[in-house]
Every structure is written in C-alpha cells, then in structure tokens.
Amino acid sequence: MSGLAERIAAAKAEGRAALIGYLPVGYPDVDASIEAMVAMVEAGADAIEIGVPYSDPGIDGPVIQEAVDVAVRAGVGMRDVLKAVEAVSGAGAVAVVMSYWNPIERYGVERFATDLAAAGGAGAITPDLIPDEAGEWIAASDRAGLDRVFLVAPSSTDARLRSTTAASRGFVYVASTMGVTGARDTVSDAARTLVDRTREARPDIALCVGLGVSNGAQAAELAAFADGVIVGSAYVREMLEGRGADGVRALTADLAAGVRRAGVPA
Amino acid sequence: MTTTSPPQPGELSLPARPGWPDETGHFGIFGGRFVPEALIAALDELTEAYEAMRVDPAFLEEFARLQRDYTGRPSPVTEVPKFAEHCGGARVLLKREDLNHTGSHKINNVLGQALLTKRIGKSRVIAETGAGQHGVATATAAALMGLSCTVYMGEEDTRRQALNVARMRLLGAEVIPVTTGSRTLKDAINEAFRDWVTNVETTNYVFGTVAGPHPFPAMVRDFQRVIGDEARVQVLEREGRLPDAVLACVGGGSNAIGIFTAFVPDDGVRLIGFEAGGDGVETGRHAATITGGTPGVLHGARSYLLQDDNGQTIESHSISAGLDYPGVGPEHSYLNDIGRAEYRPITDAEAMEAFALLCRTEGIIPAIESAHALAGAMKLGREVGPGALLLVNLSGRGDKDVETASAWFELGEEAAPTDEDDRAVEVGRGADPGPGLDTDQQPTEGAVSNDGAVAGPEAGETA
C-alpha cells in the first residue's frame, strides 16, 4: 500500500482528516527550512509537502513565489530536497515532494524516482504535469513504488476527473478554487462540490483539499468532507515574517486541532 | 499600396497544414501541455472552438476582410539593392510586415484570436508583451472589437519600450508592470497565466507567439502563416523562382514560423532563424535558445530553453526586448531537430550594425528584432555569394526603438556637447558616432539638434 494512503487511512481510523503542510526547501536557507519542516512533524502534521524551488512557479501566488525566489537564487536543488526528504521521514511523517515538472525532468525522471525512494520519500505532487503528459513519470514511479499525486480543479470535466484519479496513487489533490495558491478568508463552497464529484469518479482514493486554507477553523470545515487538508501559503507566511520553526509549530497546533474537531457537516 | 488583389468571397481556400503537431499538440518530443489541470478545460474549449472556426467560411471571410481593410494586407515585398551591397552580392527581398497597421506582424495573430474570443463568448482578453508590439496589437484588436484588455509587461520592458506602453494606454488597455523574477517577458507570461487561471470564465488569453501549451503554437502559426503564403506567391510572381533562403528573427518565433510555413515543403529553400546572441553566446549573456539551450519545459510546453543544472530558467539578455526570452516555440525546436530549419545567433552589435545600415541605405527603420534577420542576411549573403536570392522577414518597424538606438549610437543627451562654444561645430553629434554609423556624414545645415528633441521617457509619459 502507498505511504500516503496508509497514513491518511490511519488518520481516518482516528476519526479525523490528515494534515498536510507545505514548505519550500531553501527559505530562508536549507537548514532553517528543514528545521521548520521537522517542527511541523513534531506538532502534528501527518505529511509534509517538500517544495522544490522553481524559477517560474506559475500556479503559485506572491507569498510562495517570494520565498521560492530566494531559494532559486541561492542555487537550492534536488540534492537539498532529498536531504529534506530524509529529515522529514526520519522525524516520522510521510515526505512527499511537490515540484513543477522541469526540475524533475532536468534531474532525470528515472534518477529522481530512484533517489527519492532511496531517501525515504513516498512520492511526488506535480502541479503542472497532467497524466496525459506523464508517461515517463508513471512508469518510473511504478518501478520505484512511489505515489504520484495529480490535481483536479473545479473546471475539470467528469471525464477528466475519471482519468486523472485513475492515474493517481496516494491521494488526489483537490484544488478547491480556480486561481493561484494563497490564503483566503473563505474556503469556497466549490471545494465541497468538487470533492463530491471526484469521489463519484473514484471512490477508493483519498481526497485532500488545498488552495486557500490558513487556519484551524477552515481546516475543521474541510475536514468534515475531505480526507486531508493541505496548507501551504500560511506556513510560508510564518517563515517570511520571521517566526520560523516556532511560528510553524504554533500554526500546526491550530490546524491539527482543526482537523480533529468533529467537523460540523457543511 | 497592395500588389495583388485580395481573395474574394468564395475563393477562400485553406493552404495545406504541415503534418504536425499531432492531435495532442506534440511536435515530435516538443510541445504538449504542461499546465495546471485548472486550465485544461479552457485549452480544450479553445482548441475545439478554433478547429470549428478555422474552416468556417463566415470566419474566413471576416478574417480576410480585416486583414485587407484594417491591417492593410497583403504587405508588399521590397527589394533593397543598396543594403544588399553589404550582403556579398546576394539579392535581398524584404517582406514588409513593418507596414502593417500597428507596425508589426503581431496584428495577424491578434485579429484571429480576438475573433475567437468573441466566438467563445468571452468579454475580456489578457496578453503578455515584451517589446510591446503584441500588447499594442492586442489592445488595438480589443478596441476594435469592444473587448476589455489587460496587458502584462515586465517592469524592465515598460522602461525600454515606454512608447508602446503609452500606445496601449491610449487604446484603452490596462498595462500592468510585472515586478516578479527578471521583470521581463517570461515573468509577464507567468503573471498572465495566473490571471487566466483565476478569471478563466470571463477571460481569454491572447498568446503572442508560437509557444505555450497546445493549441497556441499551432493556432498562432495558422494565423501568422499568411506572411509566407503571400511572400511565396509574390516572389514567384516577380522572380519566377523561389528564394534560396528565407530568413527571420526568432524570439518565441511567431514571425519566423509565419514566413517559414509556406516554404517548409520546398526542399530547396533554406529556412534560417536568427536568435538573439546578446553579448555573444560564449558570454552566457544571450537569448539564443536553440543555439545555447537544452530541451526542457517552460510556459506550458516542452522546447529548447535556457536553464541551469537545477532546471531553473536562466535569464536571457538581448538589446531587443522582443527577442529577450529564454524559451522558443516548440515547432522551431522540432524543425531544428529534424534538420528542416537552421538557427544561428546574431549579437547585439551585429544587429545594430544592420539596423543602421538599413536606415541609411534604404530609408527603412527596422525593429531591432528584425535587424537580427537583416544581420543574418549580411552574413549568409557573404557565405553563399553573388546571385543568391534571400527573402528576409522585416517583422516590424523601429519607431519603438529610437530611444534604444539613440543610446546605442550615442545620438542622445550623453553625446551632446556640454560646452556652448562647441555647439556650432558639433551640432548635436558626439565625437564617436558609435558602431555602424559613418563618421563622414555631416549634419544637415539648420537641422534640429538632438538637444532640441524631447527626451524619450518624457515623451512617453506625456503621450
């Protein structure tokens, strides 16, 4: 069974949603980012999305881009990412890499799969790679026993929900709103609708919701119908505003309580 | 002004399309769609609507009418014998896209995409722009067709191309300076994609070149191929033969694909794209993507790109804002790899030499982008020798570039004499005329000195 699916199922067995936190490697530097990821794990995150810095992060909003630009300029690369993978899985969480496609293609798809598995990583989320273009990655992740997480969006047709979920392993990333990453005051009703539609397309895979979640109350709201809650920009903001591992720890505590709250069915 | 009669209703026929891309937008290993899932529905909608539109007689008629009555097509072919004296005895014909309304080939594509926007019922267009030519063209088409328009432009480029910023604003477009990343075209594209993914229900992305995710490379090619379709007929009519080589500058590559496409089946015709070599490819400060890059994924497609070992895009450098792009359209990568087209770098200095030469010898001020193709003609002509017939795509005019050119040739304030007493002697000219200009050329008596001209930035702000 996949590392991610197992962990999300374990959370479900506890009557809660899984908490997945994102941070990019290399902001403010490699060591500090890894320290913050470990703090996330210690404070109750189930899985960490380990972000690969990329110069042209087309689906990310200004908060994530600001942090990632620093890492790109510092020359942070896949070797640093693999170091973070080892640290996170060593700390007891599931490590999943989040990467735009070009850094993986440049590193070498087969080599990436092999090295990621060796570092203890569970798989990768690829926000700009659709299954239609993913032949090489699907083959490589199969060989290495890695999860591969594709995204679905409110604009996805039912046919695409079926093909995308069929190609996914570990979980499906439900991008709840049309737009880029970034905290939002309200988590769109579209999230619920999309989760329902996706579940109909494939009932036997975990659905984790991301884009816009920034606090425990929102996490609780989503936990009522999603298998996992993904938080990114809110974590990056903690880092950008200099609160570092302590800020990350506090935010995680709030979010972890949120996913444990008996979510009021929306 | 036109040299051949425009197609009449009922006569419209579609020229044969190349055998690529395949149905999913792949040119061999290049092209495809590397975008967030959220955009797939919009790209599918565009593809479907475009495939229906491109064979719809009503569209073809309206498109042909706009090209004739609004753009001023067909654009003429001009022979430039005095310029050709510097091309090793080759004869040089220019395809005059600089004479199009808005001043470049960009209008060809934009009119097609604006019609498509209306067809799919969207009311707002967005665009990226580097030199500003595509932004101006999009703002123009939006004004013509009653669409609201937002143009993303790197902050650095808004400074280099202040005149075009003013033009876009006059045309009613909102121009948003992009301050992320390198603040040039690549970052403007990132911002435009972000806008699109957020506002896709109301908004169509009018992409300016033959890059990006499917269907843009094929669709923009189809809208631009009129350049080569016309030129092939024009050259055959006047020369009774095909050219030996077709030359064009390549940034993203839309004007080059536009003039190449009709000639792709003509095996004897060399197709040569000239990339921006900046300070020289060996310096690393260039935008010669095929010459100096490697295959990778950027802005939604696989193609050659300038990248480092981590897969990060490397910032490009070129005196020409329109060529200052670290990627290139996937069809060019394909044409390169199958050996049908060649790609070579032209440095800033070589391009500016050709720029000055065309101005002085033929009275045509080319866009600095197009000057790269002219410099290519100078080099190629010397290689192939007398008698060769070269067709060069003069993709745009240089009005937007006078400030850059003035700085390059030191025609502006920096070169102006500081001592009042010297003024009579050196009317408006510095000591060194800069590369490409003759030292023996004397200013015309009574001419307005450069001191009297409005400085570029001020002109831009007050326009």
Image (cartoon, coloured by chain):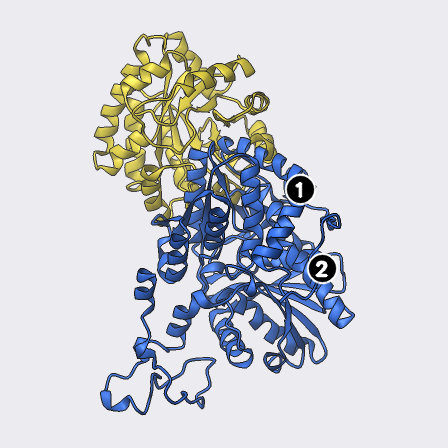
Chain colours: A yellow, B blue
- Which of the pair A50/B395 is nearer the observer? B395
Q: Residue at x 71, y 75 (%)?
A: B388
Q: Is residue A195 visible?
A: yes
Mark toward the start of the polypeptide (2 vs 1):
1
Question: Which sits in the foreground, A154 or B54?
Answer: B54
- The correct choice, above or below, for A62 with respect to A225 in the image is below
User: Considering only vertical position in the picture, is B199 above or below A14?
Assistant: below
The residue shown at (45%, 41%) is B193
Residue at image point 38% right, 84% down: B447
Quadrant (top left/top right/bottom left/bottom right) for the C terminus of chain A: top left
In the rendered structure, the answer to whether residue B316 lies left or right of residue A67 reads right
Estimate the x, y position of residue B184 in percent, counting from the top left.
40, 54
Q: Position of residue B241 (x, y in %)?
A: 77, 69
Chain designation of label 2: B
Side of B53 relative to A38 (left or right) = right
- Picture coordinates of residue B373, whole percent (x, y): 57, 68
- What residue do we see at 45% from left, 90% from top? B440
**Number of numbered markers:** 2
Q: Nearer the viewer, residue B163 or B30?
A: B163
Q: Which chain is indicated by disc 1?
A: B
Q: Considering only vertical position in the picture, is B289 above or below B440?
A: above
Q: Secondary structure at mark 1?
A: helix
Crowd rating for badge 2 (residues with CA inside 10 Å; few <14, some 14–19, many 20+):
many
**Mark 1 — residue?**
B58
Residue at which label 2 appears: B263
> Foreground mark, 2 or 1?
1
